[in-house]
Image (spheres, rainbow, N blue to C red):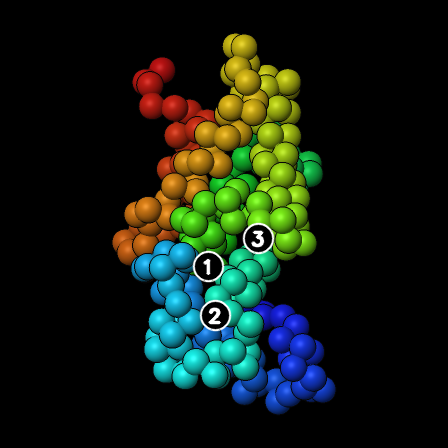
């Protein structure tokens, strides 16, 4: 995961040695992610993060202003990637069912690629964290709206074209259900477990598109 270098600018570092500087920041972000996942954002302290990264408090503050900045850097890139992925899926020249499969697979693969960053974001209640009045919060709200709209657009298209069963079904409710199903995997899915993201995406896609009833 590429970590932005805004802290370097803040500290007046013209151009730090990229490999060492970035490596240390990566280590801190990774350590923070694991502690956030275990203890929750509110209960985590800078000292907890430092201990996990085997760095002292002063070193943590050299790279980041605090745990809030660490958290924001953790989720920024991953969230943006997911929005672009969803919008690409929605714009594909394919039937809605294939777009939906593409989106579900892309989202679950992203959870593995950015583990546990995105799961921490979901676990910590995305809406609550985004509504902090900051520029970052407003950016996250806008990104979440774009993602939701891309899923809604796919569902709405499928209902209109007859690709999906359209017996008075609300596309917003269906889209919310699909997003919730994928997001809830943060409670149990282990990327290192026996089930791969590809297999999970296939099961979820079949469940949404075909249901469980025998036809």
- Identify whether 163 is placed above or below 187: above
- Identify whether 68 is placed above or below 105: below
- Give the Cα separation between the discs numbered 1 and 2: 9 Å
Residues 133 and 74: in front is 133
Q: Quadrant of the N terminus?
A: bottom right
- Give the Cα separation between the discs numbered 2 and 3: 15 Å
Contact (Cβ within 8 Å) of mark 2 with mark 3: no
Residues 33 and 192: in front is 33
Give coordinates of residue 116: x percent, y percent. 41, 59
Give coordinates of residue 59: x percent, y percent. 48, 83
Say the numbered circle drawn on residue 203: none
Contact (Cβ within 8 Å) of mark 1 with mark 2: yes
Q: Residues within 10 Å of mark 3 (few under 14, many from 20)?
A: many
Residue in the picture at 46% in, 59% down? 117
Picture quadrant where residue 202 is located = top left
Give coordinates of residue 126: x percent, y percent. 50, 46
Sequence-first disc among 2 and 3: 2
Q: Secondary structure at mark 3?
A: helix
Q: Secondary structure at mark 1?
A: helix
Q: Nearer the viewer, mark 2 or mark 3?
A: 2
Sequence-first disc among 1 and 2: 2
**Residue beneath label 1, please?**
117
**Residue beneath label 2, please?**
29
**Residue beneath label 3, please?**
79
Residue in the picture at 55% in, 60% down? 72
């Amino acid at each position: 995961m590429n970590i932005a270098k805004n802290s370097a600018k803040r500290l007046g570092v013209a151009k730090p040695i990229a490999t060492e500087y970035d490596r240390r920041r990566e280590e801190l972000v990774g350590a923070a992610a694991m502690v956030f996942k275990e203890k929750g954002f509110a209960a985590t302290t800078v000292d907890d993060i430092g201990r996990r990264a085997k760095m002292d408090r002063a070193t943590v503050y050299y790279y980041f202003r605090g745990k809030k900045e660490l958290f924001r850097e953790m989720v920024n890139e991953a969230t943006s990637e997911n929005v672009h992925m969803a919008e690409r899926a929605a714009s594909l020249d394919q039937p809605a069912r294939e777009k939906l499969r593409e989106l579900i697979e892309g989202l679950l693969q992203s959870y593995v690629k950015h583990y546990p960053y995105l799961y921490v974001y979901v676990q910590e209640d995305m809406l609550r964290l985004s509504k902090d009045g900051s520029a970052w919060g407003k950016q996250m709200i806008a990104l979440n709206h774009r993602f939701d709209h891309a899923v809604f657009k796919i569902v709405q298209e499928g209902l209109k074209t007859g690709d999906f069963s359209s017996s008075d079904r609300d596309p917003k409710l269906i889209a919310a259900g699909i997003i919730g199903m994928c997001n809830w995997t943060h409670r149990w899915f282990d990327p290192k477990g026996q089930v791969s993201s590809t297999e999970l995406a296939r099961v979820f896609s079949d469940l949404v598109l075909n249901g469980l009833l025998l036809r």
